[in-house]
Amino acid sequence: MSTLALPRAAAVSARSLSRARIGLLAVLALAALLCLWNLTISGYSNEYYAAAAKAGSESWTAWFFGSLDPGSFITVDKPPLSLWLMGLSARVFGFSSSSILLPQALCTIAAVGLLYATVRRVFGTAAALAAGTALAITPVTVAIGRVNNPDALLVLLMVGAAYLLVRAVESGRTKHLVWCGVLVGLAFMTKMLQGWMIVPALGAAYLLAGPPALGTRIRQLGLAAVAMVATSAAWPVAVSLWPGARPYIGGSTDGSVWDLIFGYNGFGRLTGDAGDGGQGANFGGVAGLWRMFNEQVGGQIAWLLPLAGASLVAGLWLTRGAGRTDRKRAAWVLFGAWALVHVAVFSAQKGIFHPYYVSALAPAVAALSGAGLVALGSWARRSWAGVAALHVALAATAWTALELLARTPDFAPALRTVIPIALAVALFGSIGLRMPELFGRRALAVAAVAGAIALSAGPAAYSAANLGHALDGNNVTAGPSTGGFGGMPAGGGMGGGVSDELIAYLQEHQGTAKYLVAASGSQTTAPIIVSTGEAVVTIGGFGGRDPAPTVDQLAQLVADGELKYVVISADGAGARGPGGTSTELSTWVQEHGTAVDDIDAGGMTLYRVTA
């Protein structure tokens, strides 16, 4: 290269870098807009987690365990990592809607940026920008970024693990794999076994394409597995070895964190044997091959699935002759296995399955789509087979968008006209990739814009719709309809709503008692905890089904002066798991208590109990 050419090359490189930075900033700004605009419209969103964040901001013990109330009577039914972020945010900024929703929004924005960085290392800037944009406008991604559920943190940690895996494929260094294992362990600390669902993809990609010899690759993966298991087990082991009294582990049948891991939050989700009362179908539709496209789930994730699938097939085909360590093929394996494992598990899951769980699938779909558009476009320039593959991907994806939009006929009706027209322009214009002599650069640019509209208009509109209404974190669904806590009665049995009058009465008469009140189900107690910051006994945990407290334990709390008041439903009925039925608890309360009849208890009855 001549001395004159060097400055020109440097100038071109600088301009490319500048454009890349501008593109990244634009994608991050889009993600920030969708996640942060009008964020507090959802209030506390999921009051179950909001109550735990409040508890963590009041008590370090409650913060460590992820307890539902500051008195640490019972924990939430998830590990506490996301609650730790919310609790710390509430301590620093004060407890409010914004302080507990902000961490999830920031996690989502960071995940978009990190996915960009991951894809760019392998496929280049154009693919990275497309992938980042795809993740930013995926409706379920925006939805989980605007509520206080743990899924936004889970997504960030999984993308971080994929980034480190790509670094390991590049370098062959053990440290990248070990840190990858640590992040997967932290994902476990966020949503337990769901955090491990990315492991087959990570392992397969490195086992295939890692630079060292096979034996070395296996040893490196073994060290990464040790780091993953050690990180995953740190909190459960600490809880199990806790020297003093500890809260009951919510969601378990025996108060053990291990039962929670392998039961309610583990295999019970797959088999339906998790004490969920048959809620899986109510939330996410019937398990089966097409669940990702059904009424409940399709609008959350299905928009780009056809493009992702076509991209995966094309990517593997185009890299079929590459060397073993080829980074592009490794990335296709990584993101392809990530997507396929999640689709298979979610489609077969018979237990509790909320549509927002598919947020963990979104980064893989976005990466495949972004990389696929670039790969298909490059293939189309070289072959008519590539043009055909590109046309199939575009047409199938646009058709899916029209099918999904048809489910909400009153929402953005213009899109049903815009998308087909944009698709037609894109299909016709893409022929110019093979016949550039007949199509100018401007025509190709118009075709590219039309293709982007055909692919993105539907999910972008669904995502933007989230900004105009509150999202219910109990069963958050993106799009023009809010969705709700489908199927489960408020209070989970003996619970229900509580009035300001009741809360004021309890605070006035609490005296020296540790607990303000006892009531069944977090749908009753969480609003009390959020409102007062007081310790509350949540009978039966989240849905009123956990076997805590037993009748003897409740009686002991009363005898020790730690509890004075219990709220039960008017007829004393309810549902509980083993270890004491709600009927037995209600009978004991009625036998040892006096009804406070002049207080509005929201359709329930307040009892002053004595030993």
Image: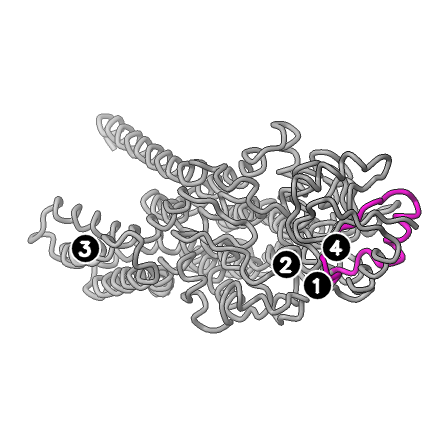
Chain part drawn in magenta: 546-572
Sequence-first disc among 3 and 2: 2
The reply to whether callout 3 and callout 2 are in contact (CB within 8 Å) is no
Does residue 340 appear to the left or right of 541 in the view shown? left
Q: Which residue is mark 3?
A: 426
Mark 4 residue element: strand
Q: Which mark is residue 568?
A: 4
State which quarter of the image contains the N terminus.
Answer: top left
> Farthest residue in the bottom direction?
288
Q: Which residue is mark 1?
A: 262
The reply to whether callout 1 and callout 2 are in contact (CB within 8 Å) is yes
Does residue 348 appear to the left or right of 140 in the view shown? right
Q: Marks 1 and 3, Cα distance to the nearest angstrom? A: 49 Å
Residue 397 lies in quadrant: bottom left
- Whether residue 238 is visible here, answered yes or no, is no
Q: Marks 4 and 3, Cα distance to the nearest angstrom? A: 62 Å
Q: Marks 4 and 1, Cα distance to the nearest angstrom? A: 32 Å
Sequence-first disc among 4 and 2: 2
10 Å neighbourhood of mark 2: few (<14), some, or many (≥20)? some
Residue in front for this viewpoint, 607 or 446? 607
Q: Amino acid at mark 4?
A: Ile
